[in-house]
Image (cartoon, rainbow, N blue to C red):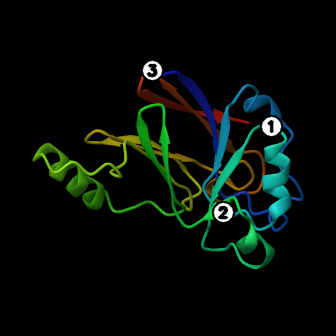
């Protein structure tokens, strides 16, 4: 039986380099989420601790995540999550779309790969992305603190999975 799931998405917080703390608007934006996915460049574990006061957190290791954050149990280079009938990858950098297309092509030839993504959540680019390549939804929530490499309020995302169907939208903070 498939259920509903609401997931908060963010990336590239760069705290404390770019901002001293997460914007307080994130609490309101993520009200009622079941899970939070951070797509990397976190810098310090307290960011994940703060987000975990809202909902459970899973995080991808960013190319700038060094030091204490490396030891955090919530952090991996790639998370493969099975959520309400959808396979989701959480990574920092966008994978080549042809890689994803090749997994999908194998599936259509009867070579079912259970780890092929339905959804890819990524960061790194400091810009919002919401597009489909074939049947795969790619989402980059931008950055709540450093969108387009400019300091100030930026964006987060919300991913809704309902009856096995995924829809995402971007929220300006």
Q: Quadrant of residue 171?
A: top right
Q: Disc 3 vs disc 2: Cβ atoms closer than 8 Å?
A: no
For marks 2 and 1 on the same chain, the one whose residue lies earlier in the sequence: 1
State how far apart marks 3 and 1 are (Cα). Answer: 26 Å
Q: Is residue 154 above or below residue 173?
A: below
For marks 3 and 2 on the same chain, the one whose residue lies earlier in the sequence: 3
Describe the element under mark 2 as helix, strand or loop.
strand
Return the mark for residue 14.
none
* Total marks in image: 3
Residue 68 percent location from the top left of the image: 80, 75
Describe the element under mark 1 as helix, strand or loop.
loop
Residue that badge 2 annotates:
75
Residue at point 25% right, 59% down?
Answer: 98
Q: Quadrant of residue 20?
A: bottom right
Q: Disc 2 vs disc 1: Cβ atoms closer than 8 Å?
A: no
> Disc 3 vs disc 1: which is toward the camera?
3
Q: Is residue 108 above or below residue 61?
A: above
The residue closer to the viewer here, 88 or 142, is 88
Residue 163 percent location from the top left of the image: 43, 20
State how far apart marks 2 and 1 are (Cα). Answer: 17 Å
State how far apart marks 3 and 2 are (Cα). Answer: 29 Å
Describe the element under mark 3 as helix, strand or loop.
loop
The residue closer to the viewer here, 166 or 150, is 166
Q: Residue furthest front?
A: 1
Asked if residue 8 lies left or right of residue 98, the reply is right
Residue that badge 1 annotates:
54
Residue 158 percent location from the top left of the image: 60, 33
Q: Residues within 10 Å of mark 2 (few under 14, many from 20)?
A: many
> Disc 3 vs disc 2: which is toward the camera?
3
For marks 3 and 1 on the same chain, the one whose residue lies earlier in the sequence: 3
Residue that badge 3 annotates:
1
């Amino acid at each position: 039986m498939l259920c509903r799931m609401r997931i908060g998405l963010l990336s590239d917080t760069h705290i404390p380099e770019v901002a001293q703390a997460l914007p307080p608007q994130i609490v309101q934006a993520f009200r009622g989420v079941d899970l939070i996915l951070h797509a990397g460049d976190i810098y310090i574990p307290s960011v994940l601790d703060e987000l975990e006061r809202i909902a459970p957190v899973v995080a991808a290791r960013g190319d700038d995540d060094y030091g204490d954050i490396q030891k955090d149990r919530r952090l991996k280079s790639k998370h493969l999550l099975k959520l309400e009938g959808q396979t989701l990858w959480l990574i920092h950098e966008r994978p080549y779309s042809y890689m994803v297309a090749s997994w999908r092509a194998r599936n259509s030839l009867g070579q079912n790969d259970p780890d092929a993504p339905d959804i890819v959540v990524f960061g790194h680019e400091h810009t919002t992305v919401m597009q489909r390549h074939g049947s795969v939804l790619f989402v980059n929530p931008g950055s709540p603190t450093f969108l387009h490499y400019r300091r100030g309020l930026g964006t987060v995302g919300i991913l809704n999975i309902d009856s096995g169907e995924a829809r995402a939208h971007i929220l300006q903070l």
